[in-house]
Image (cartoon, rainbow, N blue to C red):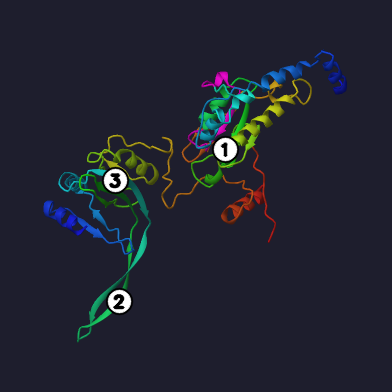
């Protein structure tokens, strides 16, 4: 992964690419690519590094959240190092995730992440369909369910929900229509809804 | 009505006596033409039911019609998504009376495992009347045959005249059921109150 990162930075020095480490035992690290150079990076990955197959495109909805970070800080006259936990607010954003393989080199997956500016207005990322044709339907799916707008996509329409649908159901703040009023053994939130409805009627 | 004992006695002597209603129902119950369409994995079981091993032809229901105009049985075989629901209701409206509906599988009955999902209709009985519901996920071909036999029994017992006549014999019965529209957030309307009233369910207080 670091070799890929270095190759990208050597070829496209202006690109903002960083390695996102996965601390889990699987160690599936990924590359976070800035929106401005995503298309150039994708073309480089395909043409020079041989990632000729994009198997999966999906989305992630990141709500605004807090990140705790432990930093070392020098304090006092003797410059003693002090550990300090800093809490940082991260604004919400949407993320498109691409899984790339190289059939020619029998390698992969390489995980590529591209992030939008926020979750409401600035939700566009460049489409990678011009680079990998197989991304077309899956980018449409990510647009349909997450509301990520892929600029440069040849045919960006909803693919699963109907055209007049207004919401993006896979977003974390999506509220499904309340049509679950009958259930043989209601429990939890459904039971509360059923009882509220019965009392209102 | 003819006495059953007398009828059996006459039959032994070579005289067959039947009511018009009985003959009519006998004819149509043994020649049900299902509409040829499947929605999900239940359709695979439906296809198996129609094929050689289970052979739905034994019960006279093998003529799957690709047009609703020629079909009189609709087998809802699988998950009905909200996107598909208006089309299913429209196909039902296009079928000629008398027509019957079998809801096959958990999804067609209630939404099944997708009941709390955002895109699945929680049972086709919200929009059209269902005659036989077959539970299962998916039901085996034997279960579909059992459902078909249940439907045949129901058809055989239907009255054509009188106060408790069949739905299709009632001139006041609606020929068309309202087709829902895919709205901005959900189907509009989400259910047809004329055919479906949600039953209030309360669990005993613990």
Q: Which residue is mark 1?
A: B108
Secondary structure beneath dot 2 equals strand
**Which mark is on residue A124?**
3
| Distance of label 1 from label 2 (alpha carbons) | 57 Å
State yes or no: discs 1 and 2 in contact (Cβ < 8 Å): no
Whole-number angstrom distance, CA of label 1 to CA of label 3: 38 Å
- Secondary-structure class at tag 3: strand
Q: Is label 1 or label 2 in front?
A: 1
Which chain letter goes with mark 3?
Answer: A
Above or below residue B199? Residue A8 is below
Viewer-proximal residue, B59 or B157? B59
The answer to whether tags 1 and 3 share a subunit is no
The percent coordinates of residue B198 (x first, y second) are: 64, 42
Q: In what quadrant of the picture does the N terminus of chain A appear?
A: bottom left
- Residue B53 seen by the camera: yes
Q: Give the secondary structure at mark 1.
A: helix
For label 3, the crowd category at 10 Å Cα-Cα, with few meaning under 14, some 14 to 19 and many 20 or more, is many
Q: Quadrant of residue B30?
A: top right
- Residue A160 falls in image quadrant: top left
Which portion, as a residue range, is magenta?
B65-84
Query: Which residue is found at the position 34% from the left and 41% from the top?
Result: A138
Q: Chain of mark 2?
A: A
Q: Taken as a whole, is the magenta stretch helix, strand or loop?
A: loop
Q: Which mark is residue A84?
A: 2
Q: Looking at the picture, do discs 1 and 2 lie on one chain?
A: no
Q: What residue sits 78% from the left and 24% below the top?
A: B163
Instruction: Name which of mark 3 and mark 2 comes first in the sequence.
Output: 2
């Amino acid at each position: 992964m670091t070799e890929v990162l270095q190759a990208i930075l050597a070829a496209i020095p202006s690109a903002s690419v960083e390695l996102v480490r996965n601390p889990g035992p699987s160690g599936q690290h990924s590359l976070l690519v800035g929106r401005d150079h995503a298309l150039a990076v994708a073309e480089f990955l395909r043409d020079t590094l041989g990632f000729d197959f994009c198997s999966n495109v999906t989305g992630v909805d990141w709500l605004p959240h807090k990140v705790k970070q432990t930093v070392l800080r020098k304090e006092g006259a003797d410059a003693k190092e002090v550990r300090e936990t800093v809490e940082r607010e991260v604004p919400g954003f949407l993320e498109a995730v691409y899984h790339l393989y190289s059939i020619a080199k029998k390698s992969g997956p390489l995980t590529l992440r591209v992030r939008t500016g926020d979750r409401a207005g600035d939700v566009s990322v460049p489409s990678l369909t011009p680079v990998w044709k197989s991304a077309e339907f899956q980018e449409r799916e990510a647009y349909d369910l997450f509301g990520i707008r892929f600029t440069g996509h040849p045919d960006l329409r909803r693919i699963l929900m109907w055209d007049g649908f207004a919401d993006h159901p896979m977003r974390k703040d999506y509220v499904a229509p309340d049509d679950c009023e009958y259930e043989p053994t209601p429990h939890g939130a459904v039971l509360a809804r059923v009882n509220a409805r019965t009392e209102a009627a | 009505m003819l006495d059953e004992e007398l009828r059996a006695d006459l039959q032994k002597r070579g005289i067959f006596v039947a009511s018009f209603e009985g003959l009519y129902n006998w004819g149509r119950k043994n020649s049900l033409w299902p509409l040829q369409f499947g929605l999900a994995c239940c359709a695979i079981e439906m296809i198996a039911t129609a094929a050689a091993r289970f052979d739905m032809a034994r019960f006279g229901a093998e003529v799957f019609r690709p047009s609703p105009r020629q079909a009189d049985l609709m087998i809802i075989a699988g998950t009905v998504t909200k996107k598909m629901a208006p089309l299913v209701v429209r196909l039902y409206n296009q079928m000629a009376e008398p027509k019957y509906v079998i809801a096959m599988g958990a999804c067609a009955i209630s939404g099944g495992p997708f009941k709390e999902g955002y895109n699945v209709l929680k049972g086709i009985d919200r929009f059209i009347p269902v005659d036989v519901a077959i539970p299962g996920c998916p039901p085996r071909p034997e279960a579909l045959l059992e459902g078909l036999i249940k439907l045949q029994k129901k058809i055989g017992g239907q009255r054509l005249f009188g106060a408790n006549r069949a739905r299709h014999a009632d001139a006041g019965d609606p020929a068309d059921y309202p087709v829902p529209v895919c709205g901005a957030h959900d189907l509009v309307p989400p259910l047809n109150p004329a055919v479906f009233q949600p039953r209030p369910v309360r669990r005993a207080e613990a």
